[in-house]
Amino acid sequence: MNLKQMYEFFIQSGIEKDPRGKEEVSKVLVEKNEEYKSLSSDKKKDYDLNMLTNPYADSRIIFGTGKEEVKNIMVGIDIETPELLIANQLRLSGAKIDVVLGHHPKGKAFSTFYNVISMQAEINEAQGVPINVAEKLISQRMAEVRRNISGSNHQRVSDAARLLNIPMMTAHTVADNHVESFLQTKINSLKPRYIKDIMNILEDIPEYKYAKSFGSGPYILCGNQKSKCGKVFVDMTGGAEGPAEMIEKLVNAGVGTIVGMHFSEKHFKESQKQNLNVIIAGHISSDNLGINLMLDGLEQKYGQMNIIECSGFRRFRR
């Protein structure tokens, strides 16, 4: 397996688990290709060709030709310059590291990741929110996130990878899609009646069980153990936390409980106001789950890899 094959596998597996469905993702890609064909020659030069086959701006090769052979992968939730320096030091000490895989986007994957947020419109529509309302709220959130990240030093980490000559990629939304699909499918099949039932489901999953061992396990943000679940919405993907204003729309659409990675104070207060049950599964532990599910698929296709854990990642094989 080379780096390009690993990248392509992650993108395809992300599409397979996309909560919008493969048909909707295919439409998005068709529209991107039609948009590209309609551009003048000058504008085509600046177009992000990655987006013609990859609907996830935050998941891509950060540094590398794609031809690098991959058998030894250093995996971390946040790969920044310190982690790359660790990788380089391990290499100097004799360790084999072919590529560094991070979850949270860096480089161009970070400067453009706000585009992924658009997928939340269809995700919320599937929960019963009218698409016109969902699109309006999500477009406002996309603009907000773009403003917030516009001043960041986007190329700092990718420059470090280039200077150290360490191939690197990030897999963000593709991994988050796996988490949402896995948990929503499990919860739907087990049909929990009370919040405590969902907690039991989560705490039986290795990544959440491990997080609980050091005080960072799932917890109930709004509601209590004996609260009835109602309709459960696992909200784990879409680039960034959605707009707090969406909570009222979801409750009005019939959602009784949200299982999420994390909630801001604004989201917490709005959830209380709307009498919504909220379970925080955990941020880094959920990221671990998504990456592990992807790696399971990768190893099933290409054989077992040598995984070097770092930056909050722990490998649990299924």
Image (spheres, rainbow, N blue to C red):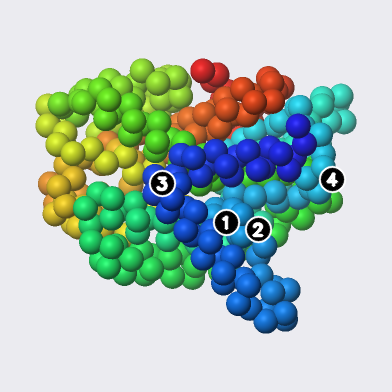
Q: Residue at x 18, y 39 (%)?
A: 231
Image quadrant containing the N terminus: top right
Which one is nearer the viewer's eye here, 86 or 140? 140
Residue tagged 4? 165
- In the rendered structure, the answer to whether residue 274 lies left or right of residue 45 reads left
Which one is nearer the viewer's eye here, 196 or 15? 15
Query: Can I make out residue 214 in this image?
Result: no
- The mark closer to the camera, 2 or 3, is 3
Q: Secondary structure at mark 1?
A: loop
Residue tagged 1? 57
Give the distance between the C-alpha atoms of the residues marked 2 and 4, in whole angstroms.
22 Å
Residue tagged 3? 21
Q: Which mark is residue 221?
A: none
Closer to the chain start, of discs 2 and 3, is: 3
Q: Number of marks in the image? A: 4
Give the distance between the C-alpha atoms of the residues marked 1 and 4, in whole angstroms.
23 Å
In the depicted structure, whether residue 108 falls above or below residue 90: below
Residue type at numbered disc 2: Asn
Residue tagged 2? 50
Give the distance between the C-alpha atoms of the residues marked 2 and 1, in whole angstroms.
8 Å
- The mark closer to the camera, 1 or 4, is 1
Corner quadrant of residue 203: top left
- The mark closer to the camera, 2 or 1, is 2
